[in-house]
Amino acid sequence: MTTRWQAEKQTVVNAAMELASASLVSGSSGNVSLRLPGPQDLFAITPLGKPWSDLGIDDIVVADFDIEPVEGELAPSSETLLHVNAYKARPDIGAVIHTHSLYASVAAVAGLEIPPLIDEMVMAIGGPIRLSRYAFPGTQDLADNVLEALGDRNAALIRNHGAIGAGRDLREALDVCSLIERAAQIYVQASLLGKVNVLPIEVIETQVELFRMQRKAEDTS
């Protein structure tokens, strides 16, 4: 089935395949969405319960911001509220990915936020990776809690659940998700060694300001 969003839906499928290949998701867990261009508030998202290994372009669901279906026969992801609320709250976000990667999930279960450990983490994410308050999966409470933890950054941990990465496009969101997992692994293993050194506060402040300035410049360009 050919649609006006064929290229965008293929981009979602490609991102899903990359996530599965990198073991950031497994089975049918996790979800990927992309804000669609045009005057309407629409997004494309992976469907509910479809294994990543079987995902095809016609499985991608297009919906509006009221989560009314526009295209596709499958039900959208159970975490669709999280995605659409991120788009509503953050016009700078063009793509959202929810992962269940191992070390990010370890941190989320242990109740650990990930402090600014490495330079690229602050430059790409905008600061620490905050941990949301717990809420039942798929609910408005979960969406609200995760958005609170996300703030103006590109990543958050979902308590007892996994992580969320956001970006201007799917390439950036994918890179953020990879970085979340790397930072979580570094943090967990450094903690086991008994010593975690965060970046100097003046470095963090400078890098966060650079992150925000870059975002502002892109928003006005």
Image (cartoon, helix red, strand yellow):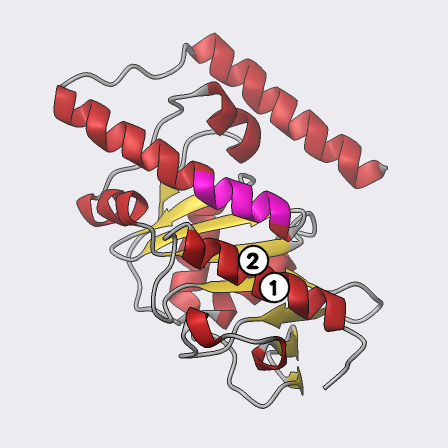
- Using the rendered view, name the quadrant where residue 68 is placed: bottom right
- Residue at 50% x, 77% y is 47
Which image quadrant: the C terminus? top right
Left or right of 184, for residue 64: right
- Residue at 49% x, 9% y is 202
Residue hosting label 2: 15
Amino acid type indicated by mark 2: Ala
Report crowding for label 2: few under 14, some 14 to 19, many 20 or more residues within 10 A (C-alpha): many
Q: How far apart are marks 1 and 2 (CA)?
A: 5 Å
Cβ atoms under marks 1 and 2 closer than 8 Å? yes
Q: Position of residue 207 (x, y in %)?
A: 56, 19
Q: Position of residue 193 (x, y in %)?
A: 14, 20
Is 168 situated above or below 76?
above
Element type at mark 2: helix
Res. 151 in view: no
- Residue at 65% x, 78% y is 63
- What segment is highlighted magenta in the picture? 171-178
Near-viewer residue (219 or 175): 175
Q: Magenta span: helix, strand or loop, mainly?
A: helix
Near-viewer residue (221 or 71): 71
Report crowding for label 1: few under 14, some 14 to 19, many 20 or more residues within 10 A (C-alpha): many
Q: Position of residue 66 (x, y in %)?
A: 63, 78
Q: Does the magenta stretch include residue 36?
A: no
Residue hosting label 1: 12
